[in-house]
Image (cartoon, rainbow, N blue to C red):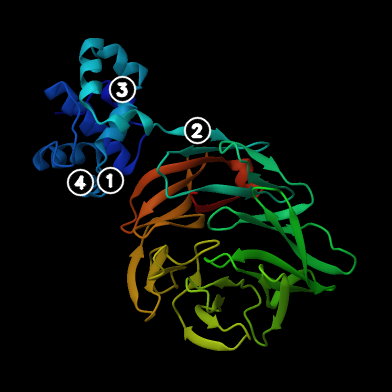
């Protein structure tokens, strides 16, 4: 079951679990003339052997053991189609699970920028919006396309996809605002937030979609400093501005999973504020919040920070309730894009010739490439990909 010769033309551009499963599928087919149908195939000894050849942790097979998906990918590779007899291929496909051919990866090129998404039908999260320094786009109802929304510098889709929060790029008179857009009808509702010289940014949803939190900033010299937050009741259409003395001037606010408090970085730790701006809990010296729009895992049991200087790893995982360290993730990253699921993070990493958005397990192993991002898109346009729950 050696991975050799032309095999590397098939597996050389893959990483993590994808590389290992792809290699196992290929070698299993050569031996058995069919594809494996469950995690127990091939045998553990074979898994360990092939894993050693492709330099991937064999434990990833148990975690991502979806042979049918990779079978579909292998069978759609022109090089392999040319090497295998079509009669054998068709016989194997007939015996494989019916959903095998429904899980092919779809590539989506984002408009006006050098980014290509790689999506699968059962992904728990997808890019629902993206922005650059000067433009903002939201996913259309056609699913695989994005539309530019003029007049907005920031768009954030709600957890179920039913609403979009838009931060306008200009004031309405002397007042800043946020616009709630109904995804189905396109109807908008503008809610005023603060008056000049203040402004509000970083509109983040509570998980029940009833509230928004925006960070209030004030320009001091040439820099913008955080001074508080504005809470939006999206049902009543009301806004409440709260100023917080001594708040970290570079922080932003996000809701905790239960929607009761707002979490924010405070110097080298994290603070939890109630809706009146009072500190209710503090975890000092745990690092600054990572995770882009949501530092908390889907279950809410864990939160991710950029590790403090005393650790060499990139990301630190903490128990939300106790503040105790649960894990450290060593994969180097340019940015954090949140959680994929309770056992994986989404990170932006540097690759030869550009960057990639990847799924990383809590051991620091890349298990999936979600997007290819060109160097100009990241460095010049400062593209931001907003990953939210797939609807």
Above or below, 383 against 235 in this view is: above
Q: Residue 321, located in which quarter of the rendered image?
A: bottom left
Checking the image for residue 305, the label placed there is none
Please tell me which residue lies in front, 4 or 27: 27
State which tag comes first along the sequence, 4 or 1: 4
x%, y% of residue 172?
Answer: 86, 63
Q: Mark 3 vs mark 4: give the one in front.
A: 3
If you read the primary sequence from the N terminus, does the residue marked by circle 1 or circle 3 appear first? 1
Label 2, residues with CA under 10 Å away: few <14, some 14-19, many ≥20: some
Q: Which residue is mark 4?
A: 58
Q: Are marks 2 and 1 in contact (CB under 8 Å)?
A: no
Q: Residue 182 versus residue 384: which sits nearer the camera?
A: 182
Q: Which residue is mark 1?
A: 64
Where does the N terminus fall, quadrant-wise? Answer: top left
Residue position for label 2: 107
**Mark 3 or mark 4: whose residue is earlier in sequence:** 4
Mark 3 in CB contact with mark 4 (< 8 angstroms): no
Q: Is residue 215 above or below residue 120?
A: below
Q: CA distance from mark 2 to mark 1?
A: 21 Å
Q: Quadrant of residue 158?
A: bottom right
Q: Secondary structure at mark 1?
A: loop
Mark 1 Cα within 10 Å, few/some/many (few <14, many 20+)? few
Q: Are marks 4 and 1 in contact (CB under 8 Å)?
A: no
The residues tagged by marks 3 and 2 sit, at their Cα atoms, a distance apart of 18 Å
Is residue 383 among the parts visible in the rendering? Answer: no
Secondary structure type for disc 3: helix
Q: Residue, x 15% and y 40% (percent of image)? A: 47
Look at mark 3 in the image and give the residue it sits on.
Answer: 75
Q: Element at badge 4? A: loop
């Amino acid at each position: 079951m050696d991975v050799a010769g032309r095999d590397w033309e098939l597996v050389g551009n893959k990483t993590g679990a994808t590389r290992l499963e792809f290699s196992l599928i290929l070698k299993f087919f050569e031996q058995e003339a069919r594809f494996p149908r469950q995690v127990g195939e091939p045998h553990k000894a074979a898994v360990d052997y092939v894993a050693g050849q492709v330099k991937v942790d064999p434990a990833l097979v148990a975690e991502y053991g979806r042979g049918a998906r990779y079978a579909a990918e292998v069978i759609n590779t022109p090089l392999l189609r040319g090497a295998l007899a079509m009669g054998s291929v068709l016989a194997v496909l007939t015996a494989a699970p019916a959903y095998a051919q429904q899980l092919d990866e779809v590539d989506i090129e984002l408009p006006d920028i050098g980014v290509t998404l790689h999506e699968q039908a059962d992904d728990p999260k997808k890019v629902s919006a993206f922005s650059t320094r000067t433009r903002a786009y939201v996913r259309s109802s056609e699913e695989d396309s994005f539309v530019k929304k003029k007049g907005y510098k920031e768009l954030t889709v709600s957890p179920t996809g039913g609403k979009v929060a838009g931060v306008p790029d200009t004031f309405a008179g002397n007042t800043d605002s946020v616009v709630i857009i109904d995804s189905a009808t396109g109807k908008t509702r503008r809610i005023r937030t603060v008056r000049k010289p203040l402004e509000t940014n970083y509109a983040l949803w509570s998980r029940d979609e009833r509230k928004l939190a925006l960070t209030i900033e004030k320009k001091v010299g040439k820099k913008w400093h955080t001074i508080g937050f504005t809470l939006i009741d999206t049902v009543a259409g009301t806004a409440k501005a709260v100023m917080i003395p001594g708040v970290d001037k570079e922080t932003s606010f996000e809701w905790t999973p239960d929607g009761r408090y707002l979490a924010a970085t405070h110097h080298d730790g994290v603070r939890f504020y109630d809706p009146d701006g009072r500190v209710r809990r503090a975890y000092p010296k745990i690092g600054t919040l990572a995770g882009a729009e949501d530092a908390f895992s889907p279950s809410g049991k864990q939160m991710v920070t950029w590790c403090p200087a005393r650790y060499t790893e990139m990301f630190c995982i903490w128990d939300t309730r106790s503040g105790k360290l649960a894990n450290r993730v060593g994969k180097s990253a340019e940015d954090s894009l949140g959680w994929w699921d309770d056992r994986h993070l989404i990170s932006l990493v540097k690759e030869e010739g550009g960057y990639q958005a990847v799924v990383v397990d809590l051991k620091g192993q890349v298990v999936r490439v979600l997007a290819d991002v060109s160097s100009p898109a990241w460095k010049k346009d400062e593209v931001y990909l907003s990953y939210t729950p797939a609807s």
